[in-house]
Image: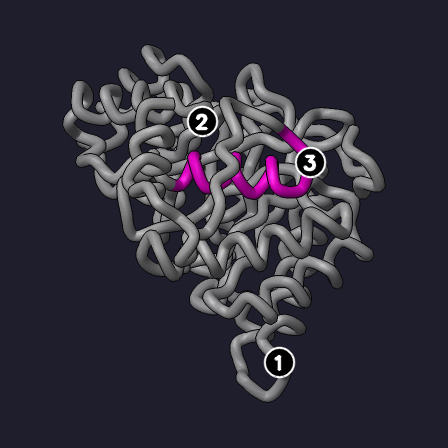
Amino acid sequence: MERGRRTTRQVSVGNVRIGGDARIAVQSMTNTDTRDVDATLAQIDELVEVGCEIVRVGIKDGDSVAAFGKIAARSEIPVVADIHYSADLAIAAIEAGAHKVRINPGNIGAEAQVKRIVDAARATGVSIRIGVNSGSLAEAYREADAPLSDRLVGSARHFVDLFESWDFHDIVLSLKATSVTETIAANRAVSRLVDYPLHLGITEAGSTFAGTIKSSVGIGVLLEQGIGDTIRVSLTADPVQEVRVAFEILRALGLRRRGVEIISCPTCTRCEIDLMTIAREVEDRL
């Protein structure tokens, strides 16, 4: 375990462990049409090449589920089914071979529908990421009187208590906002309340430039405080860039190292070569 890191339960996602003494895992998400099996697998291969260890795939209909089963069976890394609104799709994805499912219980519907997903996951040994963001809060926390971070924590705690009442503990917890400060505050607070592994990220962070900065600050602050067990950098960009940024965050904090670190000087009037072009070329080749 990395220095000073918060102690958490350990959850398995296929052959990758999250939490406990496992290293911080790097995730991404495909942006291909899931129904195009070959295109999705090709993108997963690109992500694997730059170090991605868990990949999430969106499922929006029955055809997506059918394709998802083929993708999960052929992928080199564990595949997570990303589900919104439909318990039926979540259960179908579990039956198709998902290594984990990501749901936002607040948008699935009645608790009975959420329990159906939990029962299916338990029966097959599949873990669940409980996602909480401003659009998927538990009903009691949707009013805007309290700060968003407090409502994220209250909602997360509500869902954790619910899952525990059903004797389900293979949970990864995620509290995200587009606001860096709200995300930091929420994850700090929830880390003191539960010992489930935390998935870190800034949701809808933006383009490569802005999203990299927001994600580096938000994720980096939390990791430096020993909070976080797996990370996903969310960019409106090629997901390969998400993985590259994630590893640079981990490298900057001395938590993981992958590939070569390039050290180059900022240019000034004393520079007599085209250093920016050289640095870019070296980075691209490496």
Check disc 3 and give the amino acid type.
Answer: Gly
Check disc 1 and give the amino acid type.
Answer: Pro
* Spatial CA span between label 3 and label 2: 18 Å
Quadrant for the N terminus, please. Answer: top right
Side (left or right) of 37 relative to 196: left
Q: Is residue 221 above or below residue 4?
A: below
> Counting other residues with Cα less than 10 Å from the Cα at mark 3, is it few (<14), some (14-19), or many (20 or more)?
few
Foreground of the two, 27 or 124: 27
Closer to viewer: mark 2 or mark 1: 2
Marker disc for residue 124: none
For disc 3, the marked residue is 254
- The spot of residue 45 in percent (x, y) is 31, 19
Q: Name the residue located 69 percent from the left edge and 36 percent from the top edge.
A: 254
Counting residues from the start of the chain, the first of labels 3 and 1 encountered is 1
For residue 58, say whether it is visible.
Answer: no
> Counting other residues with Cα less than 10 Å from the Cα at mark 2, is it few (<14), some (14-19), or many (20 or more)?
many
Which residues make up the magenta segment?
242-256
CB under 8 Å between discs 3 and 1: no
Counting residues from the start of the chain, the first of labels 2 and 1 encountered is 2
Foreground of the two, 259 or 15: 259
Q: Is residue 242 above or below residue 75?
A: below
Q: Is residue 42 above or below residue 100?
A: above
- Residue furthest out toward the bottom: 145
Counting residues from the start of the chain, the first of labels 3 and 2 encountered is 2
Dot 1 falls on a residue whose secondary structure is loop
Dot 2 falls on a residue whose secondary structure is loop
Side (left or right) of 8 relative to 209: right
CB under 8 Å between discs 3 and 2: no
For disc 2, the marked residue is 52
